[in-house]
C-alpha cells in the first residue's frame, strides 16, 4: 500500500510516494519556480526514484502542468501512479480555520471551504487548492485527504488563543491564534514519547520546530496548550525571512512615514525580514559561515534569533510548570549544534543541561543531547511531516 503526499506552495510542489506503515519512500521530488520564466537551464522538476534522479528543465506554467510532468516522471521511473494501488493522496493544507481540525476526505464542498479560508492564508491556501484540484483531475479514482497544519492547535486554551482586541471584531473576522506546523509538533511529540518509552499522556513537552519557518509549542499530555505562530505563520520566533513578533505599531509607523502600503509591509515582514533582513542570508549554514568570519550583522542576527527562542522556552517552562522533554527538530533544530547549545545555555537551575559531545554528534536518528540522568530530557528528533500526512490519510480511508 502506498500514499502520494503533496505539499503545494505558492510557486512549488513537494511530493513523496511512500508506504505509510514502514515509512519507506518509493519516490520523491520537487517542482520549483512554477509560473516563472526559466532562462538559466536549471531543472524545474527534480524527481528521485530508486536511487536515481530524473530532471525536467522546461518552464512550468502552473501547478496542473507541474503535476503532469511529475506523473510523466513517475511513469519514466517505473511507478505508474494510475496502477500503483494508491490508498490515498494526502494533501498538506496550511489553514483549516475554525472549520477543519481533523484529516478530511476531500469533495467539492471541502475544496470550496478550503478556498474560502484563503483570506486567512493568502499565500498558502490558494496554492493548496490548485494542488488538490490538479491531483483530483489526474487521479479521479483515488481518495484525496486534506491534513491541516492548524489541526493540532485547534483546542488551544482560550487564554492562549485569544488576542486582546475588541471581541466582536475578532469573532467577526476569525481573529485568533491558530498555530501552524501542527503536523510536525504532533508527530515529533509522539516520537519523543516513543523514544523515552513513556506514554505521551504523562509528558509535558516543549517542541522547537526550527526550519526556514520556525515555531515552538508547549504540549501537556499530548495536548497543545500554547504555540508561537498565530493568526498567520508570521508571529513568534525569528525565521529565515519572517520577522516573528514585533510591536504592531511598527506597521502603522512604516505605512505613515516610509511611503509603504500594506502589501509592501506584508512583503517586508514575510520575505525580507528575519535572518535575511538582519544579515542578508536566510540559510543557517551561510549565517554560521559569516559568523565565523567575524561578520557583525550575522552575529547580531544569531543573537536576536536565540534571544527570541529563549524567551519562549522560558514562557513555556512557566506555562507547563514542569517539563519532561525539550526537543529540537526540522532543518536548523536537527542540524545546528550552536543554536541548540545557545538556546539551552545556563538553564541548569531548571534541570536543563546539554552534553557538548552528544550535542555535536552526527547521528541522524532520535537522540539525547542532555547528559545521562539529567532531570529534563533535551533531545533531537527528526520530523517527518510527509509520513505523518501519509499515515493520517491512510487511517482515514481504511
Ligand atoms: P522548511 O521550513 O522549508 O521545511 P527545513 O526544515 O528543511 O525547512 O529547514 C531548512 C533550513 O534548515 C535551511 O534554510 C537551513 O537554514 C537549515 N539547515 C539545513 N541544514 C543545515 C545544517 N547542516 N546546519 C545548519 N542549518 C541547516
Image (cartoon, rainbow, N blue to C red):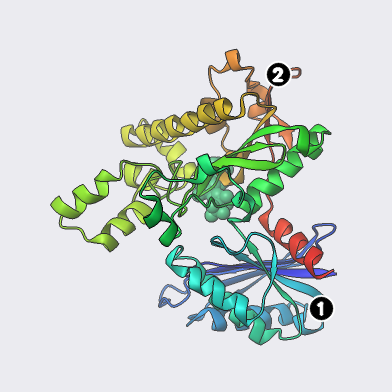
> Please, is residue 104 above or below residue 385 in the view?
below
- Which residue is at a point 52% across and 67% down the rendered structure image? 9
Q: CA distance from mark 2 to mark 1?
A: 48 Å
* Secondary structure at numbered mark 2: loop
Q: Is mark 2 within 8 Å of ligand 1?
A: no
- Image position of 139 with respect to 172: above or below: below
Query: In the image, residue 223 lies at what x, y percent?
Result: 68, 42
Which comes sooner in the sequence, label 2 or label 1? 1
Q: Quadrant of residue 219?
A: top right
- Disc 2 crowd rating (10 Å Cα; few below 14, some 14-19, many 20+) is some
Residue 198: x and y, percent?
Answer: 82, 33
In the image, is 172 to the left or to the right of 19? left
Residue annotated with mark 2: 375
Taking 67 as reference, is 52 above or below it? above
Secondary structure under tag 1 reads loop
Q: Percent x, y for residue 261?
A: 22, 61
Residue farthest to the front, as pictured = 168
Give the residue number, with chain letter if any, for mark 1.
84
Asked if residue 261 lies left or right of residue 362, the reply is left
Q: Dots 2 and 1: beta carbons under 8 Å?
A: no
Of the pair 9 and 34, the residue shown nearer to us: 9
Residue 190 in the image: x percent, y percent?
75, 43
* Pick the front one: 297 or 149: 149
Amino acid at each position: 500500500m502506498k500514499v502520494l503526499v503533496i505539499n503545494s506552495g505558492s510557486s512549488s510542489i513537494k511530493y513523496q510516494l511512500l508506504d505509510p506503515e514502514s515509512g519507506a519512500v518509493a519516490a520523491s521530488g520537487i517542482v520549483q519556480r512554477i509560473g516563472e520564466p526559466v532562462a538559466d537551464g536549471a531543472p524545474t522538476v527534480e524527481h528521485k526514484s530508486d536511487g536515481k534522479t530524473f530532471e525536467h528543465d522546461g518552464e512550468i506554467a502552473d501547478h496542473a502542468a507541474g503535476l503532469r510532468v511529475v506523473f510523466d516522471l513517475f511513469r519514466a521511473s517505473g511507478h505508474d501512479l494510475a496502477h500503483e494501488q494508491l490508498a490515498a493522496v494526502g494533501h498538506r493544507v496550511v489553514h483549516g480555520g475554525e472549520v477543519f481540525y481533523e484529516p478530511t476526505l476531500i469533495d467539492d464542498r471541502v475544496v470550496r471551504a478550503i478556498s474560502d479560508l484563503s483570506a486567512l492564508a493568502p499565500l498558502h491556501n490558494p496554492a493548496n487548492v490548485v494542488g488538490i484540484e490538479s491531483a483530483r483531475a489526474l487521479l479521479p479514482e483515488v481518495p484525496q485527504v486534506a491534513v491541516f497544519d492548524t489541526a493540532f492547535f485547534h483546542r488551544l486554551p482560550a487564554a492562549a488563543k485569544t488576542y486582546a482586541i475588541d471581541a466582536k471584531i475578532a469573532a467577526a473576522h476569525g481573529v485568533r491564534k491558530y498555530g501552524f506546523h501542527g503536523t510536525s509538533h504532533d508527530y515529533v511529540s509522539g516520537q519523543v514519547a516513543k523514544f523515552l518509552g513513556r506514554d505521551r499522556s504523562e509528558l509535558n513537552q516543549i517542541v522547537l520546530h526550527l526550519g526556514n519557518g520556525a515555531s515552538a509549542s508547549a504540549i501537556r499530555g499530548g495536548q497543545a496548550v500554547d504555540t508561537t505562530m498565530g493568526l498567520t505563520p508570521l508571529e513568534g520566533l525569528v525565521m529565515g525571512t519572517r520577522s516573528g513578533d514585533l510591536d504592531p505599531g511598527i506597521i502603522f509607523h512604516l505605512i505613515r512615514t516610509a511611503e509603504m502600503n500594506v502589501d509592501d509591509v506584508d512583503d517586508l515582514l514575510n520575505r525580507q525580514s528575519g535572518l535575511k533582513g538582519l544579515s542578508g542570508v536566510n540559510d543557517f549554514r551561510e549565517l554560521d559561515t559569516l559568523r565565523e568570519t567575524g561578520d557583525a550583522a550575522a552575529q547580531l542576527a544569531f543573537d536576536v534569533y536565540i534571544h527570541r527562542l529563549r524567551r519562549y522556552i522560558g514562557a513555556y517552562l512557566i506555562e507547563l510548570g514542569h517539563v519532561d522533554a525539550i526537543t529540537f527538530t526540522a532543518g536548523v533544530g536537527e542540524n545546528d549544534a550552536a543554536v541548540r547549545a545557545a538556546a539551552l545555555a545556563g538553564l541548569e537551575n531548571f534541570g536543563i543541561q546539554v552534553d557538548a559531545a552528544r550535542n555535536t554528534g552526527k547521528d541522524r536518528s532520535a537522540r539525547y543531547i542532555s547528559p545521562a540522568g539529567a532531570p529534563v530530557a533535551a533531545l533531537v528528533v527528526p520530523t517527518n511531516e510527509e509520513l505523518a500526512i501519509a499515515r493520517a490519510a491512510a487511517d482515514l480511508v481504511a
